[in-house]
Image: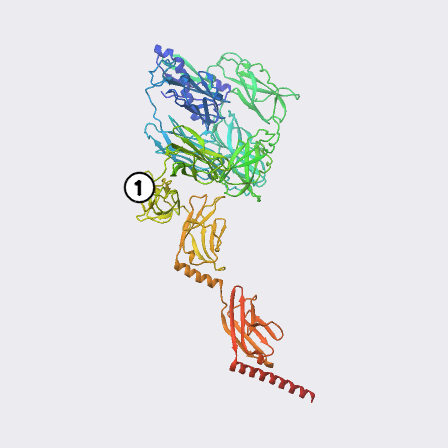
């Protein structure tokens, strides 16, 4: 039979006389059911509640925040001396604190036997070495302000190879039973792809994806994917979508808001443990509706929901570049409509506002907008829907047995009225106190009447008047209610009166004096800010909390490039801790940081700026060296080589220390006290015939790293084989999509003759099959290997050859993936158009702070710069210049960049190319000024001689010299020199051209680096003709001048 349930919304006399509606259900009248009647009654009530909740849009997750075990502890049976790990996942708000108990006695964690982990709602207890006395019942108790929860599991520790003995837990019920014959399959999860730090803006969509391998991958034992944000378990919602399966876990944030910012953790949970990955998601403000308007508030919370009011709280946005916030507007929207209504006429000054005047039984969304002098900012993300509902409504449900096969579920209030006036409430107290309101709660009186009961609240301002009734129009049904419109910073007393249709009780005992809060202002500025290196794009910021927190909510962190005033927000959601990792910084750039504290009133003053810090990876201890190789043994000593640590710790590994162990004696001893600088060392003082192992430690600026894995056992006996020993130090450069260059160092032991060549062998990673790369040996310590498979990984080894044969193979190289580094460029060769220098130029696609360019010829580092070779480096660009190029510069030149992912390239200068470049270099270094005319002469009046030429073009800064018979002439009245840059004419006028002037006249011109020269030969008949013409012009000038003077005298 379908259940019928009706609720009246008023408590008038008309309501009391209205026929009550009820829910009638059939049940069995057997004796067994009679015994279980109380259980059935509770089940009926529970069924009504479950149907009622969706009708009223109640969201319990915003109201109930007690601890809850998502993954409970599981029991285990183990053998002694083995390790065991109990783990569970707990959710709740505030984050629950978990304590561990053994047989109801709290565990002593300080003993060192037990190790406890706690992160993002995950809690684990580990016993590294179990003993029989660890057999016990273990309990995890999670608690917070709203309650506690517990989970139990037993551990039974069995002696190895003994029959199972009786344990005190064989009596346990089924849910705690130990089934030793059931062996859980251990599932290993390895992440192959993970999500990184993510940056987004409001309104964007973000997807976090992890791919993984699951071994074994059993259909009935798939891991559970749990997603957390700042240690709070996420659930599917309008804003969050989750997918999991087939080795992929995906979290989609459908429309980013600043509420979504935080540290995201994926926890893949299996019966045998878990796999965890985490990264931060940053959400920046979207474009404001008005320029310089504040950003959206966030973290909208609904508190103390009741029949006609709720209390809304939120967190303020950061205002790094915007003006200070004046206040906030709170909006509401009834569920099922799109009509947003502003709740407050003037901006609320603090981040909490009581919204009154709601309709009972109606559900609402809420949002908040910030206001400053520029305008109103974007609204926050709307809250979850909340119902304006009496929180004790379901507590008043009542089940009554009617007899036969029927019972009824109804409200106490709906029963037929009878009885007398109720007694007074008790224990009236303030559960929450604010500036203008107080939330009161009390214990209802013992009440057996069937008549509905309600409450009136009375208040008294201390020292100012008499008792006043607060709710004269609205009867209060629940023992919790908020009294509004109080004065800030005043003292009040409160009492409560019970009432029903028969009368009013005596007042309760008054509360203790309750003082409403006063605005104390924003927090004081945080203390000293310290920035330390984290990675090459992030910095760890730590600071001291403010001296006056004043209800601190969290902190905002700002960053700024040193020397600028362009401050940017590092986080857009208040951070609660006093440490924060700022991501997304530029490697090598120098930053300063500051912090502001936040409370309900706003932001504090900025802290003092941190000391400037250059962004680069933090220095750490180096990892251990590996692959120790024996290169030679003479019967008393051994020459060792090893590979450098994979991780240097951010600083050069400059020192190495070796330990040796005589396998027969099993004791380790230091080989060297002063550090070794190279990865090649001769260990002396060994005993012939003994077997030794070695291990190596690397050291950098931070200190000494871990020791390597001990080497293979090496027997100390002299090498006498005629073939060469192994080559060593195989490295790779110029990795492209189908080729790479292998380099190595020559063997320490040559054998019975000089080394004549090398053979290189390759093998695909994971294969035991080796193949020759070169059929004929090479006589140098490098080889370009071609024809490789793109994307495949290979290992290589080298064998040296002499006249006696091919020697032993080198230690195999580390695997190398044949794939070009994105952005890789090749070396460019050319001639500088200004200097005439031949150059090789290279631009690196990667650069670290400690990166250096290493230039080589024939794969040997260039160290001799006495022959005019110069290296110039600026930023990511390096150039090799040949100041005095000649035929010795033929060959292969290569460059590699240290502290990168193998950035390198090479270029081969051929004889033909060098010849062309030398010719071009000469022309550039020795440019010629083209001439329109060569040096010539013209005889002027008075017999003066003009020597001149015309160039194709000259500048105003041109210089020139005239010579007569190799004697330089000076610019004077007798030899006046001039030029015209516009026409390109250069001339010299000789005032006296005589018989002594016979010979060669020359002009030398220089304009910048360009030069020109021209000569005029005046000897023999040519000179005589020029001299005769000059004499004639001189005599003619005199004749004309004397005739003119005679006419003037006459």
Q: Nearer the viewer, residue 822 or 364?
A: 822
- Measuring 34% from the left and 26% from the top, which residue is drawn there? 185
Res 504 → quadrant: top right
Q: Farthest residue toward the bottom? A: 1050
Q: In the visual, does 651 lie left or right of 639?
A: right
Quarter of the image where one finds residue 591: top right
Residue 721 place in picture, x, y as percent: 33, 40
Locate residue 212: give its quadrant: top left
Q: Is residue 206 visible?
A: no
Quadrant, the N terminus: top left
Front residue (pair 371, 778): 778
Residue furthest right as drawn:
1049
- Residue 878 visible in rendering: yes
Q: Nearer the viewer, residue 793 or 634?
A: 634
Label count reads: 1
At which x and y percent is residue 510? 60, 17
Q: Residues within 10 Å of mark 1 (few under 14, many from 20)?
A: some
How did the renderer colour the structure? Answer: rainbow
Query: Which residue is drawn at the image coordinates 57% and 30% (left, top)?
Result: 552
* Residue 979 drawn at (x, y percent): 57, 71
Against 876, residue 201 (above or below) is above
Which image quarter holds the C terminus? bottom right
Q: Which residue is tagged 1?
A: 770
Q: Secondary structure beneath disc 1?
A: loop
- Residue 641, given in percent of the width and then of the height, sits at 41, 39
Front-lying residue, 90 or 410: 90
């Amino acid at each position: 039979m379908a259940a019928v349930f009706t609720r009246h919304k008023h408590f008038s006399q008309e309501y009391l006389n209205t026929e009550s509606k009820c829910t009638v259900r059939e049940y069995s009248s057997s004796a067994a059911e009679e015994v279980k009647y109380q259980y059935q009654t509770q089940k009926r009530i529970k069924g009504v509640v479950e149907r009622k909740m969706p009708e009223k849009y109640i969201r319990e997750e915003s109201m109930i925040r007690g601890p809850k075990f998502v993954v409970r502890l599981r029991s285990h049976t183990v053998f002694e001396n083995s390790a065991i790990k109990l783990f569970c996942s707990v959710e709740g708000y505030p984050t629950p604190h978990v304590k561990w108990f053994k047989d109801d006695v709290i565990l002593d964690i300080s003993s060192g036997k037990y190790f406890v982990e706690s992160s993002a709602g995950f809690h684990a207890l580990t016993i590294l070495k179990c003993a029989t006395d660890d057999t016990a019942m273990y309990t995890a108790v999670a608690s917070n302000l709203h309650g506690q929860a517990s989970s139990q599991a037993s551990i039974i520790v069995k002696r190895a190879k003994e029959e199972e003995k009786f344990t005190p837990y064989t009596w346990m019920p089924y849910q705690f039973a130990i089934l030793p014959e059931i062996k859980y399959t251990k599932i290993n999860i390895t992440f192959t792809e993970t999500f990184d730090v993510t940056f987004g803006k409001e309104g964007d969509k973000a997807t976090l994806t992890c791919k993984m391998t699951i071994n074994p991958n059993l259909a009935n034992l798939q891991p559970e994917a749990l997603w957390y944000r700042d240690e709070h378990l996420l659930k599917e919602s309008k804003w969050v979508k989750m997918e999991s399966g087939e080795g992929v876990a995906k979290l989609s944030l459908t429309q980013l808001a600043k509420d979504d910012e935080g540290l995201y953790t994926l926890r893949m949970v299996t019966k045998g443990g878990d796999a965890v990955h985490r990264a931060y998601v940053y959400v920046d403000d979207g474009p404001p509706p008005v320029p310089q308007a504040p950003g959206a508030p966030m973290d909208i919370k609904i508190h103390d929901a009741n029949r006609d009011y709720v209390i809304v709280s939120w967190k303020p946005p950061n205002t790094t570049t915007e003006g200070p916030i004046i206040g906030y507007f709170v909006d509401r929207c009834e569920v099922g409509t799109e009509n947003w209504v502003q709740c407050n006429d003037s901006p609320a000054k603090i981040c909490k506002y009581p919204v009154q005047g709601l309709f009972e039984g109606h559900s609402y969304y809420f949002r908040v907008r910030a206001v400053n002098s520029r305008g109103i900012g974007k609204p926050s993300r709307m809250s979850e829907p909340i119902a304006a509902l009496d929180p004790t409504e379901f507590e008043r449900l009542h089940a009554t047995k009617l007899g036969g096969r029927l019972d009824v579920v109804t409200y106490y209030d709906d029963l037929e009225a009878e009885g007398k006036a109720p007694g007074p409430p008790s224990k009236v107290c303030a559960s929450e106190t604010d500036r203008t309101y107080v939330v009161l709660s009390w214990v209802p009186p013992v009440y057996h009447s069937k008549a509905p009961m309600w409450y009136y609240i009375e208040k008294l301002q201390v020292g100012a008047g008499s008792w006043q009734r607060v709710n004269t129009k609205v009867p209060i049904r629940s023992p919790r209610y908020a009294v509004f419109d109080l004065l800030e910073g005043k003292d009040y007393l409160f009492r409560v009166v019970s009432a029903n249709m028969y009368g009013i009780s005596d007042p309760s005992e008054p509360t203790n004096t309750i003082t409403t809060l006063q605005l104390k202002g924003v927090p004081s500025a945080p203390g000293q800010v310290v920035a330390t290196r984290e990675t090459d794009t992030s910095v760890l910021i730590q600071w001291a909390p403010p001296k006056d927190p004043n209800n601190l909510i969290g902190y905002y962190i700002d960053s700024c490039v040193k020397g600028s005033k362009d401050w940017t927000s590092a986080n857009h959601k208040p951070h609660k801790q006093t440490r924060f990792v700022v991501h997304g910084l530029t490697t090598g750039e120098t930053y300063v940081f500051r912090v502001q504290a936040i409370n309900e009133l706003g932001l504090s003053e900025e802290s003092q700026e941190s000391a400037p810090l250059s962004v680069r990876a933090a220095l750490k201890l180096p990892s251990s060296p590996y692959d120790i190789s024996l290169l030679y043994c003479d019967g008393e000593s051994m020459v060792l080589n090893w590979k450098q640590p994979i991780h240097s710790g951010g600083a050069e590994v400059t020192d190495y220390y070796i330990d040796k162990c005589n396998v027969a004696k099993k004791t380790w001893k230091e080989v060297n006290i002063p550090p070794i600088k190279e990865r090649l060392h001769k260990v002396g003082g060994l005993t012939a015939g003994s077997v030794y192992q070695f291990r190596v430690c690397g050291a950098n600026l931070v200190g000494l790293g871990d020791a390597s894995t001990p080497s293979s056992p090496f027997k100390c006996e002299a090498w006498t084989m005629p073939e060469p020993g192994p080559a060593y130090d195989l490295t790779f450069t110029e990795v492209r999509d189908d080729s790479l260059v292998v380099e190595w160092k020559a063997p320490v032991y040559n054998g019975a003759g000089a080394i004549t060549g090398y053979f290189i062998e390759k093998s695909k990673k994971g294969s035991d099959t080796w193949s020759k790369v070169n059929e004929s040996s090479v006589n140098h310590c490098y080889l370009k290997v071609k024809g490789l498979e793109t994307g495949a990984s290979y290992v290589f080894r080298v064998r040296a050859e002499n006249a006696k044969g091919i020697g032993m193979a080198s230690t195999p190289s580390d695997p190398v993936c044949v794939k070009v580094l994105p952005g890789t460029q090749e070396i460019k060769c050319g001639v500088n158009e200004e200097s005439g220098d031949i150059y090789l130029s290279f631009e690196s696609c990667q650069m670290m702070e400690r990166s250096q360019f290493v230039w080589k010829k024939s794969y040997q580092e260039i160290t001799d710069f006495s022959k005019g070779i110069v290296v110039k480096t600026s930023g990511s660009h390096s150039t090799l210049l040949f100041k005095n190029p000649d035929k010795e510069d033929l060959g292969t030149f290569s460059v590699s960049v240290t502290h990168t992912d193998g950035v390198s390239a090479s270029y081969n200068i051929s004889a033909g190319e060098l010849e062309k470049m030398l010719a071009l270099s000469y022309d550039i270094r020795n440019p010629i000024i083209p001439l329109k005319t060569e040096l010539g002469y013209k005889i002027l009046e008075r017999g003066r001689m003009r020597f001149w030429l015309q160039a194709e073009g000259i500048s105003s800064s041109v210089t020139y010299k005239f010579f007569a018979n190799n004697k330089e002439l000076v610019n004077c009245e007798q030899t006046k020199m001039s030029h015209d840059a516009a026409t390109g004419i250069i001339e010299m006028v000789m005032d006296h051209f005589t018989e002594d002037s016979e010979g060669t006249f020359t002009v030398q011109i220089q304009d910048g680096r360009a030069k020109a020269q021209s000569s005029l030969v005046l000897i023999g008949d040519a000179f005589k003709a020029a001299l005769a013409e000059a004499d004639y012009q001189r005599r003619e000038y005199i004749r004309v001048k004397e005739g003119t003077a005679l006419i003037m005298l006459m």
